[in-house]
Image (cartoon, grey):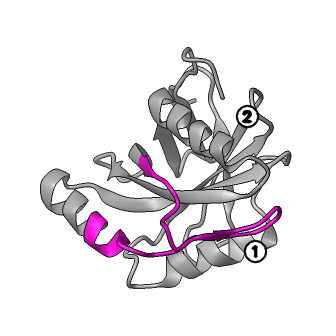
Amino acid sequence: MPPDGTSDFFGETEDGTFGIRIPAEVLVQISGWCQEAKNCETGGILVGSYTRRHTVAEVVEALPATPDSKAGRIWFFRGVAGLNRLLNRYWKRKRLYYLGEWHFHPSGRPTSSPRDCAQMQEIAQCDQYACPEPVLLVIGGTSGSWTFGAFVFPGSSPCAELIRRRDGAKA
């Protein structure tokens, strides 16, 4: 698990069109779920809002895998049990949206697999999600040395990596 001093994650596309900001406490929480999963993949969803110009997804909370999720050493299927009700509650109480997904690759790299990309592009094109540019946070590595990678999936366009900026400010 990352140390308590883990910094916020801010990443943006090379051209600055899209960005993501994830607070350190959310990264620590996700790392805990990865720790609990041991050698199996796991994942969940990211909830938050967008900046006024709609260029940066600001993650406020991450949610763990639902009870109906299925996982193995090199695969994960995120279930849906209770998510609609929960997301409706986030919207009504806090005006927070579904922003995308987080996913753990145990002992792996923080990159999106072809299956991850296909699923995220389906989400981008599905009206039910109402999320035309979903983001994916991928956690890789082993306990104590997690690494994070982030990607955006703008509709039918290819995914783009959200390159981490160390200072948390736009380049």
Q: Using the image, tell me which numbered label, if any, was put on residue 146.
A: 2
**Amino acid type indicated by mark 2:** Trp
Q: Nearer the viewer, residue 129 or 160?
A: 129
Q: Residue at x 29, y 65 (%)?
A: 86
Residue 67 colored magenta? yes
Picture coordinates of residue 151, whole percent (x, y): 64, 54
Relative side of 161 to 74, left or right: left
Q: Residue at x 55, y 75 (%)?
A: 155
Res. 14 in view? no
Q: Using the image, tell me which numbered label, if any, was put on residue 115.
A: 1
Q: Nearer the viewer, residue 78 or 120?
A: 78
Residue 111 colored magenta? no
Q: Residues within 10 Å of mark 2 (few under 14, many from 20)?
A: many
**Amino acid type indicated by mark 1:** Arg
Single out the residue that lies furthest toward the left: 93
Q: Nearer the viewer, residue 125 or 84?
A: 84
Residues at marks 2 and 1 touching, judged by CB atoms closer than 8 Å: no
**Magenta region, mostly helix, strand or loop?**
loop
Task: Tell me the quadrant of the picture where the N terminus can be found.
Answer: top right
Q: Nearer the viewer, residue 12 or 171?
A: 12
Quadrant of the rendered image containing residue 89: bottom left
Label 2 to label 1, Cα distance in Å?
A: 21 Å
